[in-house]
Amino acid sequence: MQLSQLLMEREALMRKMRLSNLAYAYAELSQVVARINRAQLQGLVSLQQPVADRPWPLLVAKEGSQSILEEHFTDEDIVDLANLFAFVFRDCAGEVIFRWEDLAGRFLGPLKEKLERAGVTIQPQIPSSSSADLEEGRASPNSS
């Protein structure tokens, strides 16, 4: 294999890697939006990225109850959401303040546009039942 061939492949692989990471972020953020919609969360929240004296992100209710957020989001969920925001929206360093009801339009929409501009076809995803729903005998949102 020639060096020039490897270098040409590198550029294409880097582009595919970036697109696959954007696709992953879109899928994950779509799940967060669906979860927020199911829980009917509303109001203003702040997602604060880690800082030197606090090496973990925070999700703070600016309106409504902080305990409601803590019921719906584990520490791991908050870390995942902060990582998604940091990766996809480079300008989201520090603190991002948004309304739950605007999450899809403000963040998911632009992400979808980036993917579509790159030629990615986005298919609607069918929500699946979680294993906890199946174990407890709850029906999925798609069952009748």
Image (cartoon, helix red, strand yellow):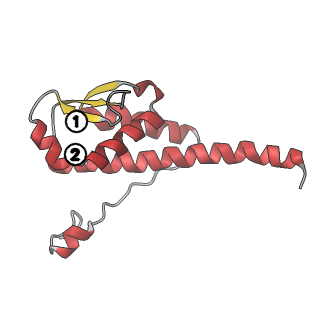
138 left or right, relative to 15? left
Name the residue at 89% across, 56% down.
Answer: 1
Quadrant in the picture for the C terminus: bottom left
Q: Residue 103's quadrant in the figure?
A: top left
Name the amino acid type tagged 1.
Trp
Looking at this view, is 2 or 43 the one in front? 2
Residue 83 seen in this snapshot? yes
* Residue positioned 29% across, 42% down in the render: 78
- The x, y position of residue 56, in whole percent, is 33, 37
Q: Position of residue 123 (x, y in %)?
A: 44, 54
Residue 20, percent from left and from top = 55, 49
Q: Tag 1, which secondary structure?
A: helix
Mark 2 element type: helix
Read off the residue under disc 2. Answer: 36
Q: Answer left or right for 111 relative to 118.
A: left
Q: Residues within 10 Å of mark 2 (few under 14, many from 20)?
A: some
Q: Which residue is mark 1?
A: 100
Write the residue at 57% across / 45% down.
19
Q: Are marks 1 and 2 in contact (CB under 8 Å)?
A: yes
One can see residue 120 in this view: no
Q: CA distance from mark 1 to mark 2?
A: 7 Å
Q: Earlier in the sequence, mark 1 or mark 2?
A: 2
Q: In the picture provided, is 123 more to the left or to the right than 132?
A: right
